[in-house]
Every structure is written in C-alpha cells, then in structure tokens.
Image: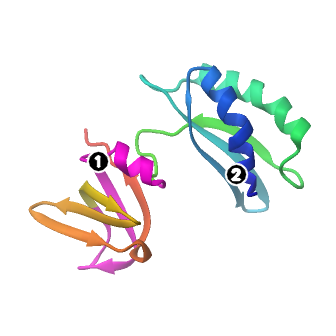
C-alpha cells in the first residue's frame, strides 16, 4: 500500500471527527526534504484552528504507525480555492465550475487553458473555452485545478 493511501486510511476518521473532509494526502520531495501533507476541506472553509487541531490529533498516530521511512515534515493545510482536481469524484463534484487545464505540450500555442468543466469520463476531460468545446485525453493533461475569478 502506498504511503499516501495508508496515511489517508487512518487520518480520514480523525479529520471527519473534527468536522472536515480529507481532500488529499501528498508525500513529496522538495529539494533534500520530504513532506507529508494533509489537505482539508470544510463547508465555509478551513481555518488555522482546524489545521492545528487535526495536526495535533494525527501526529501521535503517525508516530505510532510510522508509515513513512526516514524523516519528513508533516503539514496540515486547506485544499484551497484553486485546488487540484484528481479523482473522478472531484470532477463530478465540480462539474460546471471554472477550471484551468495545464497541458504537457501546448495546444494552439497555450499550455494553460482557462475554461469550464463540462464532462469527465475515464480520464477524458471535456471543457468549454469561450464558445469552443474541447476534449483532452488523459495523456495530454498535466494538471487540472479550480479557477477563481474576482
């Protein structure tokens, strides 16, 4: 089992007990350091108190279960307004929302396309950009994130 899946399995009930939703678990290397991050969501938004309470509750469980080899930094944060969409359930939940699609290779000279999410099936993404409907294959898409307009 992957580190992120293992951590999610024991962090999710703790996060939910604090009135939040576990949006994502990330285990990444940045420079010479490793980071284990829990991303939270909550109706009305996640605040610093939510992050602190969940960090304090999950930290001893991490010490006990020791799911990560070696040393790492543990962080708990909000998923954010412009969060990445990764799972099919993320795409279903935000159907009709403004998103930015980041591509591996430019299409019509653009690597980032602001658009509206109109469909998602088996990794294939359907969007509307202006009056144009565009379909992206999973292999073309580097990242999809929500886009907030002010």
**Mark 1 Cα-neighbour bin, 10 Å: few <14, some 14–19, many ≥20:** some
Residue 41: mark = none
Measure how far apart labels 1 and 2 are at the Cα level: 26 Å
Q: Nearer the viewer, residue 137 or 146?
A: 137
**Element carrying mark 1:** loop
Give the labeled residue for mark 2.
4
* Start-end of magenta stretch: 86-113
Above or below residue 119? Residue 64 is above
Above or below residue 62? Residue 51 is above
**Element carrying mark 2:** helix
Give the labeled residue for mark 1.
95
| The N terminus - image quarter | bottom right
Say which residue appears at 78% left-offset and 45% top-offset. Answer: 73
Asked if the stretch drawn in magenta spans residue 51, the answer is no
Above or below residue 142? Residue 16 is above
| The C terminus - image quarter | top left
Residue 116 at what x, y percent from top left?
23, 54
Q: Quadrant of residue 110?
A: bottom left
């Amino acid at each position: 089992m992957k580190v992120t899946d293992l951590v999610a399995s024991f962090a999710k009930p703790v996060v939910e007990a604090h009135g939040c939703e576990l949006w994502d678990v990330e285990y990444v290397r940045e420079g010479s350091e490793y980071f284990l991050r829990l991303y939270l969501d909550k109706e009305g938004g996640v605040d610093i108190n939510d992050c602190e309470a969940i960090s304090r509750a999950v930290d001893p469980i991490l010490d006990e279960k020791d799911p990560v080899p070696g040393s790492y930094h543990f962080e708990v944060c909000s998923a954010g307004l412009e969060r990445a969409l990764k799972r099919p359930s993320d795409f279903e939940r935000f159907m009709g929302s403004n998103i930015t699609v980041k591509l591996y290779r430019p299409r019509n000279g653009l690597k980032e396309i602001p658009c509206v999410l109109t469909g998602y099936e088996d990794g294939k993404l359907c969007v509307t950009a202006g009056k144009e409907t565009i379909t992206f294959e999973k292999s073309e898409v580097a990242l999809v994130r929500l886009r907030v307009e002010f």
